[in-house]
Amino acid sequence: MGLVSVDTIRDARRLLESVVRMTPMEHARDLEPPHGGPVHFKCENLQRTGSFKIRGAYTRIHGLSEEERARGVVAASAGNHAQGVALAASLLGSKATVFMPERAPLPKLAATRGYGADVHLHGEALEETLAEAVAFAERTGAVFIHPFDHPDIIAGQGTVGLEILEQVPDVATVLVATGGGGLVGGVASALKGVRPDVRVVGVQAEGAAAFPLSLSAGNPVRLERTQTMADGIAVGAPGPVTFEHVRSLVDDVVTVGEESLSRAVLLCLERRKLVVEPAGAAAVAALLEHSGVFEPPVVAILSGGNVDPLLLLQIIQHGMTAAGRYLSLRLRVPDRPGSLAGVLSRVSELGANVLDVEHSRISGRLAMGEVEIALKLETRGPEHCADVAAQLQRAGFRVLF
């Protein structure tokens, strides 16, 4: 099967004109200094259903015959593809059945049902969920809508690339969150078909990086396991169709760690006022982890914003820790009235915010007449952390970490 052409992607764009929105391009000025030029965010987290997935799902289902649509469609997804298929099927008059992992985030589960899909929970890993969806299709005659490995899916996702060329005509590098490869393959097809000089870089989580191994081997390679907070790109292996697109058109695939992912989510929320899920922030994580590597102007695609509020709270805390915004330390002070008040007063003067405090007189490590105070503080960053600790030491408190 040949690669999806830019003309096919243009056809998909015309098809989607009344279905999807042209998502905004946000100028990220605060990220310009380490990259030596303009940096922009393509906000697909603001797309209908909260991610780019509606583009490919609608294109694929629209391409079915009336008889196929009448049989219904079935999909497997951790959430974003599920919502895209559910909405697309409802718009095109087809019944959607969606299989999701047993631990799928509740907001994604509720949203998928809200778009009218019949949802079944099955399996721990997405591969198990996919297998059950395929088995359902074989039993019932429903058409299986693959989350990434189909030319129509790739064509629909590629419309993001055409929008980027219109919004940032002089773009030099595009960073794309990459799981199975549908988005990066489509974006690369669109960009290379118009501007072959644009560099396209896929971004994978270190704990779910199937493409580097697959590209090195020359064929799709399945990971033994995936482990990352970025569930939307936690795909064990690329498909044969997306693999060929990435091998032929994508210039590089880089990986990012969990700390960078959480810092990226925090940056989007704090500096851009954008809610982005960890998978959706992978391209921003690459900007944080690989400073000065990408030629500007750079566009980073924010691929999704569907995140469980409880998970978002954990990610924010993780991101603040990774960014050096939290400081945990222990102090030894004389056991006399006013010691704790003195410590807290000094911390306040230094501009740190007390999140938690524990005061203990009972420990074999303590000398007679001594108490231990454990503090968890919110600070302005690593330099402020170091200054707070040094100033407390100078004030006569024994500082331990």
Image (cartoon, rainbow, N blue to C red):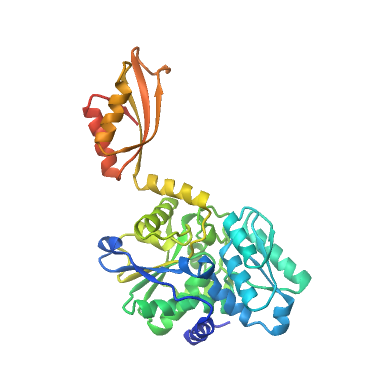
On screen, 202 above or below 380? below
Q: Nearer the viewer, residue 288 or 277?
A: 277
Residue 108 position, x and y percent, is 58, 59
Residue 398 seen in the current view: no
The total number of labels drawn is 0
Q: Nearer the viewer, residue 376 or 126?
A: 376
Measuring 73% from the left and 73% from the top, which residue is drawn there?
Answer: 142
Q: Nearer the viewer, residue 361 or 187?
A: 361
Residue positioned most to the right: 139
Residue 324 seen in the current view: yes
Measuring 59% from the left and 66% from the top, which residue is drawn there?
Answer: 83
Residue 294 position, x and y percent, is 33, 67
Q: Nearer the viewer, residue 59 or 358?
A: 358
The quarter of the picture where residue 39 lies is bottom left
Residue 234 position, x and y percent, is 54, 59
Quarter of the image that includes the N terminus: bottom right
Measuring 39% from the left and 18% from the top, which residue is drawn there?
Answer: 365
Residue 389 position, x and y percent, is 27, 34
Please indicate whether residue 189 sits to the left or right of residue 151 in the image. Answer: left
Measuring 36% from the left and 56% from the top, which residue is drawn there?
Answer: 289
On screen, 388 above or below 75? above
The quarter of the picture where residue 354 lies is top left
On screen, 186 above or below 45? below
